[in-house]
Image (spheres, grey):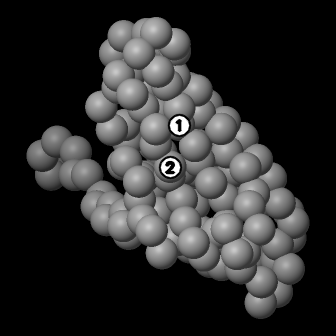
Amino acid sequence: MVYVVEEQNLEAWRAQTTRVGMNGTWLGANRGNTYLFFSVDPGEHHFCVDWTSSGSPGRLVSLASLIAEPGKVYYLRARANGGRYTFPSLDLELVNSDEGKLLVASSASSQSAIKKRGGSK
């Protein structure tokens, strides 16, 4: 099981939607201080978080990887920071289980929905 917790501290920016991907596939998104979780098979996995803004700084991306073992739980923190006079930054890091449990307990669960495109044939 992998939890991805979004921690946003953006002084002059509104809450951003951060997409979460694994092994080249987008899995969901967090907005503000939320989390999502999903199960993974044992082995090496590569994670990506990103967000795009229409102005500066444009697109921010951060990457991390881990080797998942059967029955273990992993916590990744996506941290977005930005001040009034600085560009925002986005970092993704693996945190220990104690910190991960605290982050999950103090965040809301992200509710993702699949967007429908265009009309049907």
Residue count near mark 1 (Cα–Cα under 10 Å), binned few <14, some 14–19, many ≥20: many
Provide residue 34's location: percent of width, then percent of height.
41, 59
| Whether residue 101 is situated above or below residue 107 in the rendered picture | below
Q: Residue at x 36, y 67 (%)?
A: 108
Work out whether mark 2 precedes mark 1 in sequence or the reverse, and give the earlier one: 2
Q: Secondary structure at mark 2?
A: strand
Residue 12 relative to residue 2: left or right? left
Circle 2 residue: 7
Residue 68 relative to residue 20: left or right? right
Question: Of all residues shown, which one is farthest toward the left?
Answer: 119
Provide residue 111's location: percent of width, then percent of height.
31, 65
Is the C-beta separation of discs 2 and 1 under 8 Å? yes
Q: Amino acid at mark 1?
A: Ala
Provide residue 27's location: percent of width, then percent of height.
51, 58
Q: Secondary structure at mark 1?
A: strand
Q: Quadrant of residue 99?
A: bottom right
Residue count near mark 2 (Cα–Cα under 10 Å), binned few <14, some 14–19, many ≥20: many
Residue 22 appears in the figure = no
Residue 115 relative to residue 40: left or right? left
Circle 1 residue: 80
The CA distance from mark 2 to mark 1 is 6 Å
| Whether residue 8 is situated above or below residue 21 in the rendered picture | above
| Whether residue 25 is situated above or below residue 105 in the rendered picture | above
